[in-house]
Image: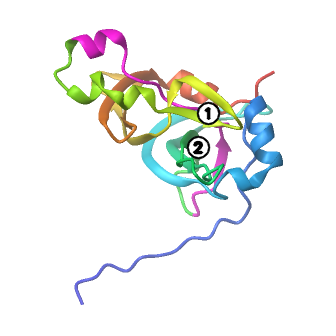
Amino acid sequence: EGFEVVTKFKASKSEPNATFVTKTDVKLYKDRSLLIDRDSGSACCVKINWKAHDSDEDRELLLGFSHRKTQKFPPRMQYSYVSRVYAFEPNPPFEIVARSGFFCLGFATANEKKESENEQMHGAADEQKLQLLGQEFDGCPRIHFVTGIAEKIGDDETVIISYGVNDCYPRMIEVSKEFLVSLLNPIE
């Protein structure tokens, strides 16, 4: 009593392939043991207008962020996180229409650090960089985790993305919907 009935929906088809794959992704996909085998939710959702690369049909979809954790490799290493955007139908069964390849969101800028009183921005947080397959990615935190996405008030073509950097400090960035949608289209 007092509980809402929850309806479960099962997708009628499998998730689409990523729309772009980096050289690092190719190596990760070849050795699946380096990534946890599924995406997890991060933040949802804003409306987007999307036209598939192979269609003239313009559709309204919802866009969100997911993340995937890497395996500890070698085992003494720590987990890292990578993100992607995905778009899905706004009605049940909420079919995923497109997924981007993996990417990271960066550290605070020098100007942000200068203006901030958050001591975490000035400390060792920026020393923890993403490492995959023996390569260190300079502009990428080892952990970044998207926690929110919202349309910018007065500008429905821009979103504000909030995320945490290495579990130490928060960051918000403005990004155009056009850019996020471009991540869902295959690179030609």
**Residue under the point 83% across and 47% down:** 30
Residue 91: numbered disc: none
Residue 87: numbered disc: 2
Count neighbours of disc 1 (C-alpha within 10 A) and say few if under 14, some if 14 to 19, many if 20 or more. Answer: many
- Residue 114 relative to residue 59: left or right: left
First of labels 1, 2 by sequence position: 1
Q: Is residue 120 something that shows in the picture?
A: yes
Residue under circle 1? Answer: 50
Q: How many marks?
A: 2
Based on the picture, tell me whether residue 110 belongs to the magenta stretch: yes
Residue 139, compared with residue 33, is above or below; it is: above
**Residue 25 lies in quadrant:** top right
Q: CA distance from mark 1 to mark 2?
A: 9 Å
Residue 155, compared with residue 27, is above or below; it is: above
- Residue 164 relative to residue 66: left or right: left
Q: Position of residue 15 (x, y in %)?
A: 70, 54
Amino acid type shown at disc 2: Ala
View extreme (bottom): residue: 1
Amino acid type shown at disc 1: Trp
- Residue 161 relative to residue 16: left or right: left
Q: Which residues are magenta?
A: 93-114
Q: Nearer the viewer, residue 73 or 175?
A: 73
**Residue under the point 56% across and 40% down:** 82
- At mark 2, the secondary structure is strand
**Residue under the point 74% across and 60% down:** 14
Count neighbours of disc 2 (C-alpha within 10 A) and say few if under 14, some if 14 to 19, many if 20 or more. Answer: many
Residue 1, compared with residue 31, is above or below; it is: below
